[in-house]
Image: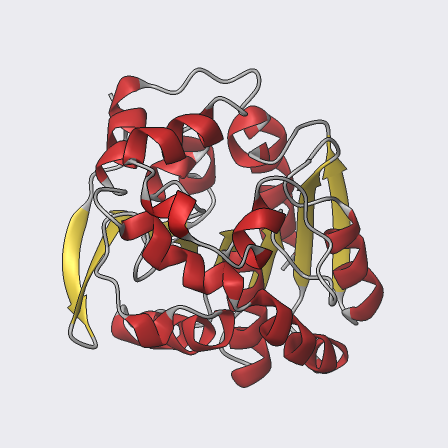
Amino acid sequence: MSDIHPRFRTIDGLSVRYAVSANSKPAALLLSPWPESIYAYDPTWTRLSEHASLIAVDLPGFGHSDLREDLLSPSRMGEFLVRVADEFELERPHVVGPDIGTSAALFAAAKAPERFRSIVIGSGGAVSPTELGTPLHEWVHDEDLTPYRALGPKDVVNVAMDAIEGYELPDVVRQDYLAGYQGQRFVEQMAYVRAYPAELQELSKLLPSITTPVQLINGKHDTVVPVSNAEYLHERLPNSRLDVVDAGHFVWEENADEYARIVTTWWQKN
């Protein structure tokens, strides 16, 4: 039985799915990875909730939140993150945004320097020009999307989940992931990462000016988003720390204990 209990809220006309863990500690806004959902935090939820009041959000267009085409880029998603924090009346929350949340959180920090207490990111595309592994490189750069239109949710989710090592997905989590990728939703979501070549080039110009403290976490054996992406950010962000963990891409699930330890230690220092 999961401690994550989803609910929905309308934000800017979109139905956004979220979950909360109520306590009086500083707030932390957790962003869903792709192709997963807020249930990606199932193995770390209890540990993280001991140190912060959690609000986990399926980003618009991902998980079980409504999709809107104009938000399917890191810069626009970053703007939406500020709106989410405002909507939930969060006063300088921490942000945890692995995977696709990496670039969105950085754009948000660049746009609103004092809005977030700290950021935890990693396992997300950052290098310009892109340095991505399989299958993300193909998702970003393939000219013909026809093969992807034939994929069903089981094809997308099972390929991703089969890459997770050392963690057996609880059935409720796997079923939630599958339910979030019905129809053509995966192909529609690809617009977000296909914006990387232009968006990451723009982000690279902003990195030296981002003053928000940033904790980078990346799997040592990540073949989807090589650790060079986190190293690239660490070299350019003026206030950052990098931890490389013994895991693959889905480090928050594959090595949940270490992930939670790094995040909570970071929160205690910031």
x then y, percent, for residue 45:
40, 35
Question: What's the residue at 59%, 80% (across, down)?
Answer: 110
Question: What's the residue at 33%, 58% (across, down)?
Answer: 188
In the rendered image, the quadrant that contains the C terminus is: bottom right
Seen from this angle, which residue lies furthest right? 235
Residue 125 located left or right of residue 181: right
Q: Is residue 11 visible?
A: yes
Question: What's the residue at 48%, 55% (across, down)?
Answer: 144
Colour scheme in use: secondary structure
Report the label total. Answer: 0
x then y, percent, for residue 65:
23, 56
Image quadrant where residue 235 sits: bottom right
x then y, percent, for residue 249:
61, 36
Question: What's the residue at 22%, 42% (across, down)?
Answer: 182
When the figure is inspected, residue 246 is found, relative to residue 40, above or below; the finding is: above
x then y, percent, for residue 218:
68, 42
The front one of 200 and 55 is 200
Q: Is residue 26 visible?
A: no
When the figure is inspected, residue 172 is found, relative to residue 9, above or below; the finding is: above
Residue 185 located left or right of residue 236: left
Image quadrant where residue 21 sits: top left
In the rendered image, the quadrant that contains the N terminus is: top left
Residue 6 located left or right of residue 201: left
When the figure is inspected, residue 88 is found, relative to residue 96, above or below; the finding is: below
